């Protein structure tokens, strides 16, 4: 039975590169996927593209490709990534330039586009926003991007045309890994059982280190060896959708039933209905079997037909967030931190900040629950709020900083920040309105 | 006994929604946890943090359950002023829960 190996080279846009290189050197991979797009990344990238039409792709594209391209070429590993962000075509031409300089003759680089549905959404002002039910037309003037989560279609087409490096914009994360299965095994786009199995595997892989003991280790019951040298995962899967997940031997981390179960449920709602553009996957009967060190077999995933809609992430300008922090330590520090917050509440009440919050880092910033352990060596005051303008947002940090000379004794380490807030809401649009497009260039 | 003695947990986020998986180390504790760790118990543990409801899904073959907490991130990672905008730390707070004798 035909089998392929697919590795995971990145679990987020800024992820480490050395574990991906180790995979490409030692795991005898056929494919490697790099998942690099968070919810609002594409909206930020779109703003960059508006300033410079040659930009708008992942900032680490060149850094990664510098090492990845020659390995892909030598070891015949196909690379699939959403590092194209808002500009897959520009990213593909950058990669082509690099490949030419490296003399990687014959390498085919594909850009998959079609996810940018900004113009389509603008013509559909009545579309309801999934999060709040309001019509999308109410925020047209603030919209900066609208991108559909595409499925495997464009990537599979690029593979059919012989592409070696495939750069996409927004696609569903598991699609980066499902696409090679569909292509290699000739899975039908209506064989939802198999698509569900492949989606489950893609879901295990898409966060890279998280299935290998990252975001897992606790130093007690969940011991993870050599977490500093965490390896990234790869799967070996056959055409029936059966296989195992493992990592390169000698790397740090751990793969076992517990890491796989945590990752299976990561960012999942109803496990029987995981909505993707390719199928509604069913993880509710998945089973994992430990097979020796760092090898886990999987089975039991399935799927149902996909819906006729694409989910679309709409990025919009949502004002500015201002933040200030200052620390108090030593003798009676809690009282002085409380005083600082009291002063800041009074100083800031004249303004119209939204979601203004006063936290004590070390006591209640992550969660307001009081654990009763109130003997602090130090506390850090944090004030954060939203404003309509950058200038107004800056007031928060300025007031915190002014506590150096005007506030309680011994305040130290004040910091100020202001960030433009690009937020995201979702809408659904009919799939028939969207056509994935593939453009290929050969070195 | 604390939940963390018998189970591990991971948080994920989507928009303003947080999901928290809870997975027992030993299958023998699963049945008891299903009785104790109800959606209501999770809501009450987190005080005013979870403003919507909580749905629970069970995966007995993995000794796992998944809690989907609605309106739990004050707007979600792209618009909240929380320090932990993803709610990553919520799983560890859940493990602090007293679950009695198991």
Image (tube, coloured by chain):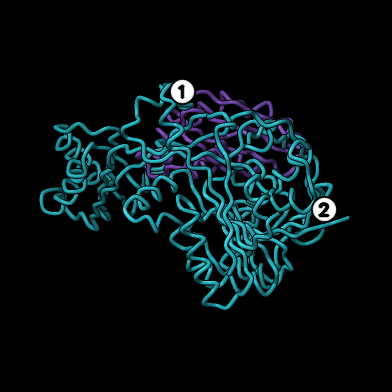
Chain colours: A cyan, B purple
On the question of residue A223 being in view, the answer is no
Give coordinates of residue B84: x percent, y percent. Answer: 42, 44
Residue at 74% in and 68% down: A28
Q: Is residue A348 above or below residue A82?
A: above
Residue at 61% in and 33% down: A269
- Dots 2, 1 in contact, CB < 8 A: no
Point out the image quarter for the N terminus of chain A.
bottom right
| Residue A418 in the figure: left or right of residue A244 | left
Residue at 68% in and 50% down: A156
Point out the image quarter for the C terminus of chain A.
bottom right
Q: Chain of mark 2?
A: A
Give the quadrant of residue A190: top right
Q: Is residue A246 above or below residue A320?
A: below
Give the quadrant of residue A304: top right
Q: For this rendering, which residue is in front, A33 or A103?
A: A103
Residue at 27% in and 56% down: A330
Q: Residues within 10 Å of mark 1 (few under 14, many from 20)?
A: some
In the rendered image, which residue does mark 1 sit on? A128
Q: CA distance from mark 2 to mark 1?
A: 41 Å
Give coordinates of residue B69: x percent, y percent. Answer: 53, 30
Give coordinates of residue A6: x percent, y percent. Answer: 71, 58
Q: Residue furthest right?
A: A1
In the rendered image, which residue does mark 2 sit on? A238
Q: Residues within 10 Å of mark 2 (few under 14, many from 20)?
A: some
Under circle 1, the secondary element is loop
């Amino acid at each position: 039975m035909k089998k392929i190996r697919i590795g995971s080279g990145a679990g987020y846009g800024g992820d480490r590169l050395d574990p991906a290189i180790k995979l490409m050197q030692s795991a005898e991979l056929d494919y490697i996927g790099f998942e690099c797009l968070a919810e609002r990344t594409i909206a930020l990238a779109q703003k960059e593209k508006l300033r410079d039409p040659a930009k708008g792709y992942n900032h680490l594209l060149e850094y990664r490709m510098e090492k990845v391209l020659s390995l892909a070429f030598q070891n015949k590993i196909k690379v699939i990534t959403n590092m194209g962000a808002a500009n897959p075509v520009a990213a593909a031409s950058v990669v082509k330039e690099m490949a030419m300089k490296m003399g990687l003759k014959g390498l085919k680089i594909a850009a998959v586009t079609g996810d940018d549905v900004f113009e389509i959404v603008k013509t559909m002002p009545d579309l309801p926003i999934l999060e709040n039910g309001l019509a999308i037309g109410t925020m047209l003037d603030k919209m900066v991007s609208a991108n559909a989560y595409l499925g495997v279609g464009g990537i599979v087409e690029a593979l059919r045309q012989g592409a070696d490096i495939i750069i996409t914009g927004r696609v569903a994360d598991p699609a980066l890994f499902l696409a090679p299965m569909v292509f290699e095994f000739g899975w039908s786009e209506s064989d939802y059982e198999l698509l569900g199995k492949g989606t489950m595997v893609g879901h295990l892989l898409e966060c890279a280190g998280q299935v290998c003991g990252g975001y897992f280790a606790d130093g007690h019951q969940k011991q993870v060896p050599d977490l500093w040298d965490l390896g990234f995962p790869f799967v070996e899967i056959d055409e029936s959708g059966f296989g195992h997940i493992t990592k390169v031997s000698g790397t740090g981390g751990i793969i076992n039933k517990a890491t796989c179960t945590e990752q299976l449920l990561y960012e999942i709602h109803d496990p029987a209905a995981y909505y993707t553009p390719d199928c509604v996957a069913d993880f509710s009967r998945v089973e994992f079997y430990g097979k020796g060190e760092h090898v886990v077999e999987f089975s039991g995933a399935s799927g149902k037909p996909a819906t006729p809609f694409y989910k679309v992430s709409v990025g919009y300008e949502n004002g500015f967030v201002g933040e200030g922090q200052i620390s108090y330590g030593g003798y009676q520090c809690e009282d002085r931190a409380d005083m600082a917050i009291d002063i800041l509440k009074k100083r800031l009440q004249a303004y119209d900040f939204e979601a203004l919050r006063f936290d004590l880092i070390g006591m209640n910033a992550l969660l307001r629950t009081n654990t009763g352990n109130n003997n602090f060596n130090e506390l850090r005051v944090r004030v954060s709020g939203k404003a309509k303008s950058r200038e107004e947002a800056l007031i928060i940090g300025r007031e915190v900083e002014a506590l150096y000379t005007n506030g309680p004794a011994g305040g130290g380490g004040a910091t100020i920040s202001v960030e433009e807030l690009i937020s995201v809401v979702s809408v659904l649009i009919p799939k028939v309105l969207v056509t994935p497009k593939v453009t290929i260039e050969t070195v | 006994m604390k939940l963390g003695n018998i189970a591990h947990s991971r948080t994920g986020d989507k928009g303003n929604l947080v999901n928290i998986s809870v997975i027992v180390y030993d299958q023998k504790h699963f049945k008891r946890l299903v009785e104790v760790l109800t959606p209501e118990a999770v809501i009450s543990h987190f005080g005013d943090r979870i403003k919507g409801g909580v749905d629970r899904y069970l995966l007995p073959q993995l000794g796992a359950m998944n809690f989907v907490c609605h309106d739990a991130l004050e707007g979600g990672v792209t618009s909240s002023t929380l320090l932990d905008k993803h709610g990553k730390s919520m799983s560890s707070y859940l493990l602090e829960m007293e679950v009695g004798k198991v």
